[in-house]
């Protein structure tokens, strides 16, 4: 079977914010990964680790401080404004909060067609027909066209947000915690909708989340992020069954198991220490203050992502030493 082509490639991407006069907040600090066409990369990590900032930098909401974003073979960071806008039409985003991401003064029809209206793409009957097609595609109907966001539930609002993202016929969608603000009973429905749309339309996803069970359900590959760095990257099965980085092991040990017998015998890894500040971070590994396997090297030298097995990358001095000695 022929391997899918790379659609998105992020190379040593950085996004820094100036805080005060001389302080620099390194929200994203040298992140690299690739996503092939039709696949999903799950991006996980604690709140504040830089996941959403990374997604917003890729999509263009934030300008990158450094690094490259290559989409369909084009380096978006070097294109002029017009070329960049055209390229980014095929990149869309589904936001976390369906209550805040929809304009309360616009009808559903105008929300979905906003991108078309700006570009003067469709008018009259064709515009109305395409809006209804998108609503039906996400599980809504034509009765919803002229209603306002406040008339819908959270799950319905997120479906409207998905329809808006699909309106420009994108190839790549960044899903920024799209189910975290929804009731548990609705989360599975929205997840199944995203999976179904991916299969129907050949979409490629960057799925940002903190719910590790949902990430496992949808992802082909998983990247674990900690304080602006990718600390581990692997296929979904391998990441869940053979995590290597101490942070990944602690993170995944917190996933509850539905079997009471297994849950009682399972040992959760509890991390000690405080999360370091991303403002002017100290040299060395950023996980070192909390790491149970910390070594002297970790305090002075930042580990680089290295391939320890085929397709499995880890940024950890201890892991790399263990692999070398085994």
Image (tube, rainbow, N blue to C red):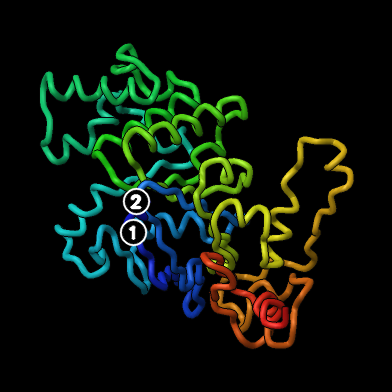
Label 1 to label 2: alpha-carbon separation: 6 Å
* Residue contact between numbered discs 1 and 2, judged by CB atoms under 8 Å: yes
- Please say if 250 is above or below 17: above
Which numbered circle lies on residue 59? Answer: none
Q: Is residue 107 left or right of residue 31?
A: left
- Can I make out residue 87 in this image? yes
Q: Is residue 229 toward the left or the right of residue 170 in the image?
A: right
Residue 169 appears at what percent x and percent y? 25, 39
Q: Residue at x 70, y 78 (%)?
A: 318
* Precedes in sequence: disc 1 or disc 2: 1
Q: Does residue 17 appear anywhere in the picture?
A: no
Task: Pinpoint residue 295: horizontal percent, then vertical percent.
Answer: 74, 83
Picture coordinates of residue 13, whole percent (x, y): 41, 70
The local crowd at label 1, few if under 14, some if 14 to 19, many if 20 or more residues have their Cα within 10 Å, is some
Q: Which residue is mark 1?
A: 6
Residue 207 place in picture, x, y as percent: 48, 48
Where disc 1 sits, the SS reads: strand
Neighbour class for label 2 at 10 Å: few (<14), some, many (≥20)? some
Which residue is label 2 attached to? Answer: 37
Residue 117 lies in what quarter of the image?
top left
Residue at figure coordinates x 42%, y 31% from the top left: 196
What is the secondary structure assignment of the residue under circle 2?
Answer: loop
Rendered position, 218 above or below 224: above
């Amino acid at each position: 079977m022929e391997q899918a082509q790379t659609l998105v490639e992020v190379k040593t991407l950085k996004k820094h914010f100036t805080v005060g006069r001389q302080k620099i907040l390194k929200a994203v600090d040298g992140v690299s990964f690739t996503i092939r066409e039709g696949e999903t990369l799950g991006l996980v990590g604690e709140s504040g680790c830089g996941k959403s900032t990374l997604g917003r930098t890729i999509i263009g909401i934030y300008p990158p401080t450094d690094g490259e974003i290559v989409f369909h073979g084009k380096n978006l960071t070097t294109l002029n404004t017009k070329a960049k806008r055209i390229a980014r039409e095929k990149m869309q985003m589904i936001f976390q909060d369906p209550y805040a991401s929809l304009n309360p003064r616009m009808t559903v029809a105008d929300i979905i067609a906003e991108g078309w209206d700006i570009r003067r793409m469709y008018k009259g009957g064709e515009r109305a027909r395409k809006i209804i097609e998108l609503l039906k595609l996400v599980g809504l109907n034509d009765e919803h066209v002229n209603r306002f966001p406040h008339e819908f539930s959270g799950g319905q609002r997120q479906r409207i947000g998905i329809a808006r993202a699909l309106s420009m016929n994108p190839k790549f969608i960044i899903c920024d915690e799209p189910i975290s603000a929804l009731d548990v009973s609705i989360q599975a429905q929205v997840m199944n909708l995203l999976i179904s749309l991916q299969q129907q339309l050949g979409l490629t996803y960057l799925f940002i989340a903190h719910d590790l069970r949902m990430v496992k359900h949808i992802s082909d590959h998983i990247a674990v992020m900690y304080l602006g760095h990718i600390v581990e990257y692997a296929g979904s099965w391998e990441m869940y069954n053979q995590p290597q980085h101490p942070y990944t092991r602690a993170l995944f040990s917190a996933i509850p198991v539905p079997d009471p017998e297994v849950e009682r015998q399972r040992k959760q890894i509890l991390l000690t220490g405080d999360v370091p500040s991303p403002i002017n971070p100290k040299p060395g590994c950023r996980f070192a203050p909390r790491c149970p396997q910390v070594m002297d090297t970790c305090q002075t030298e930042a580990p680089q992502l290295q391939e320890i097995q085929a397709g499995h990358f880890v940024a950890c001095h201890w892991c790399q030493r263990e692999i070398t000695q085994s």
